[in-house]
Every structure is written in C-alpha cells, then in structure tokens.
Amino acid sequence: MPSFLFIAVNGNNKIIAGKLDGADRSAVIAALNNQGLRPISIKDGASGTAKKGFDFDSLLNSNKVKIDDLVMFTRQLSAMVGAGVPLLRALSSLQQHTESVGLKKTLTTVIKDVEGGSPLADALGKYPNTFSDVYVNMVRAGEAAGILDEILKRLAMQQEKNSTIRKKVKSAMAYPMVLIVITFIAFFGLMLFVIPKIGKILGDLGGPDAKLPVLTRGMLAISGFMTTYWYILIPLVVGGVMLLMRYIKTPVGKSQLHHFVLKVPGIKLIIMKVAIARFARTFAALMGAGVAVLEALNVTARAVGNVVYEKALVDAAEAVKNGATLSSVIEKNPIFPSIVAQMLAVGEETGQTDVVLLKVADFYEEEVDVAIDSLSSIIEPVMIVLMGSMVGLIAASVMGPIAGLAQNIKG
C-alpha cells in the first residue's frame, strides 16, 4: 500500500506532520478527518523520498521558485491561516516541509523578517523574482483588512490561471519552433555536405565548359561560400541570435518587439487576448482585495506582460486621477475591445467591478484557447510548405542540369 506525507491541523490549531498509508489520497484524507485532523498538504511519500537524492534541477536553479511550488505554498498558507494557525508557525512549518530549494531559502529570510516585526508583504517584497508586485500588494491589502487567508486563496487561483495560459502559449509555439530549427539544420546540412558533392558530380559529367542553369549556379555559389567560410558564418549566426535575445530584453528592444507582435496577423489576436485576460483577472483580484483604484491600475500595468498595454494602463491611471472614469478611458483606446469598456461601465454602475472583470477574464481565457488552436492548425501546414519548398528548390537545382546533360548525351 502506498505511503503519503501529510501536514494537518488538529482541533487546537497545532500543526501535525507525518506519514500515513492509504489506498489513495481520498483514503488518506478520510483517515485524517476521522482522527479530527484538517489536511493542509498531502504528497506521495515515494516521490518525496526520491527527491531527497541528488537533484540536477535544484543544482542548476537553486534560487528559482517554480510557479507550481508557489501556488502550493500560497494555498497551504491560506488554509493554515484560515484554520487559525499563527502566521509565523505556518511559515515555519511550510519552510520545513517544502521540497523547493529556492522557496526554502527565501522563506528562511522571510521568517526572520516577520519575527523582527516586518509585515509579511514587506518581507515578501524583498524577493521580486519570486513574489510579484501583484502578490505583494494583495498580501498587503489582505493584512490591512484582516482577510489574509481569503486573499491568498484568490492569489493561488490567479497564479494557476496565469500559469495555464502561459503553458498553453508555450505549447502552441513549441511545434513551430522545432520545425524552424529542423529547417535551418537541414538547410545548413545540405549546403555544407550534399550540394558540394553534387556540384563535383555535375562538373565531372559536363566538363569544365558545361553551362549550368542560373538556379544551380546560385546554389553552388551559396554552398561554396558556406563551406569556405563556415568558421566565420556559424559564430556569426550564433552571435547574432544571442545579441538579438539580449537586445529584446532591453527596454527599447522589448518595446519594439511588443509593438511588432501586435501588428503580426494571427499572433496579434493571441497577444491581445492574453493581455486583456491578465489585465481583467489581476485588476479584479486587486480591487476585490480592497486596493485603491490608482494603485491597482499601476500594479496591473506592470503585471500585464506587454509594454503597449502597460503604457495604456499607466495613462488610464493618470486620466482616472484627473476625474475620468476607467471605462470611458478604456473605450477610447483601440487596443481594448469594446466589450471590456462596456463591462467596466456595468461594474462601475453596480459597484461590482471585480465580479464583472472576472467574467471578462474567463471569457478571454476561453478565447485564447480557441485562438491558439486556430493558429496551430495554420502554422503546421505553412511550415511543412516552407520545408517542402526548400527541398524542392534544391532538387530543381540538381535535376535541371542532370536532365540537360542527358539530352546532350542522347544528341
């Protein structure tokens, strides 16, 4: 029978950690409930034991906290705080039992800061790579309003939604990227190894005075250049890619990239829908937590993930500061669909902006799924056509002179 590691809280709000055998997770939960314990975390004991060995992933990314680990931490902290467990005791327990090396290191310092009298939000704010502005601001609002457990639940839910969208976009782009890499490798392989041999064969058959078609001469010239200067060409290509990647991480490069992708057909729709879904869910979460509108807009702007939308939201915050309603400002900006402004107006009239925006977020997250599926169905045949065209071009450059030589031999 499999074993499970658990963390639970008893009737006196004392944290209990241990190991329990059970047929599955449901059986373990039932057993703990029968003992008067409230389960906080249940993990497969076998997988937990396996992870105690040497972990290359932890070695390479010792300070990086995965989104799944952060979601689990947030949900567990919410459950423990909601059960009445003191914050320091909850943090200490989670720090001891987490399997994430990065999170364990981070929580060690967070616990020391909280013990020293710092609010939890300030302690988390020292680690912006792990806890985003949205996370810190929502925790701060939760501490101020005394609803930290409820805010942590919302945070975990929001992180799961964002993670789901990110994974779907990455999954949709994985296949095209693999095809592009294969295409480049095939092109370089043909040019460096196949075309030179074919050129030698054509030269032997036709002699030094053989007149080859323009296409064949062009392919042979490209192949000759690549085989002669490969030691310059390959570092140049690799260096160019690395410089490009570094450039798009700069503020100017990121801005140009984000403006560009919003003009590319197909990709534009996905980027817009992802940005709007992220804006709606983040802004709704902050408003629901009691964060002021201006602060919520500025925090959401930094979390939306696109420079164009970030600027639009910062400008919107300035307009709202001057007395305009958010819905009227959004309505004038073409990067926001009209439905967003209409739903915002309804939320402002009814005083339920957070509830309305959650519906907008759900709608656009579904739209992202549809757009990604549509893009994937288009990209696949396009990439196949490009690869086929490349192979066909090379084949034509080879078969043309061979057919001409055959005609000369017959004549």
Image (cartoon, grey):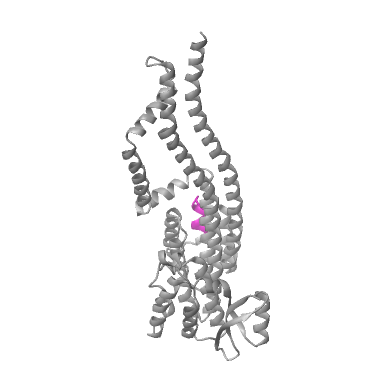
Q: How many marks?
A: 0
Q: Position of residue 71 (x, y in %)?
A: 52, 70
Q: Is residue 360 visible?
A: yes
Q: Residue at x 55, y 58 (%)?
A: 165
**In the image as oriented, which residue stretches furthest toward the bottom?**
12
Q: Work out whether residue 242 or residue 74 is closer to the camera in this orientation and state it.
A: 242
Residue 131 within the segment the image draws in magenta: no
Q: Position of residue 144 (x, y in %)?
A: 47, 80
Q: Position of residue 396 (x, y in %)?
A: 50, 25
Q: Residue at x 46, y 82 (%)?
A: 92
Magenta stretch bounds: 327-336
Q: Quadrant of residue 217?
A: top left
Whether 245 is drawn above or below 149: the answer is above
Q: Work out whether residue 290 or residue 97 is closer to the camera in this orientation and state it.
A: 97
Q: Residue at x 33, y 42 (%)?
A: 236
Q: Is residue 288 visible?
A: no
**Image side of residue 155 versus residue 222, left or right:** right
Q: Residue at x 62, y 86 (%)?
A: 37
**Image side of residue 409 versus residue 362, left or right:** left
Identify the image quadrant of the N terminus.
bottom right
Whether 120 is drawn above or below 410: the answer is below
Q: What is the chief secondary structure element of the magenta stretch?
A: helix
Q: Work out whether residue 264 or residue 107 is closer to the camera in this orientation and state it.
A: 107
Whether 361 is drawn above or below 72: the answer is above
Q: Position of residue 328 (x, y in %)?
A: 51, 58
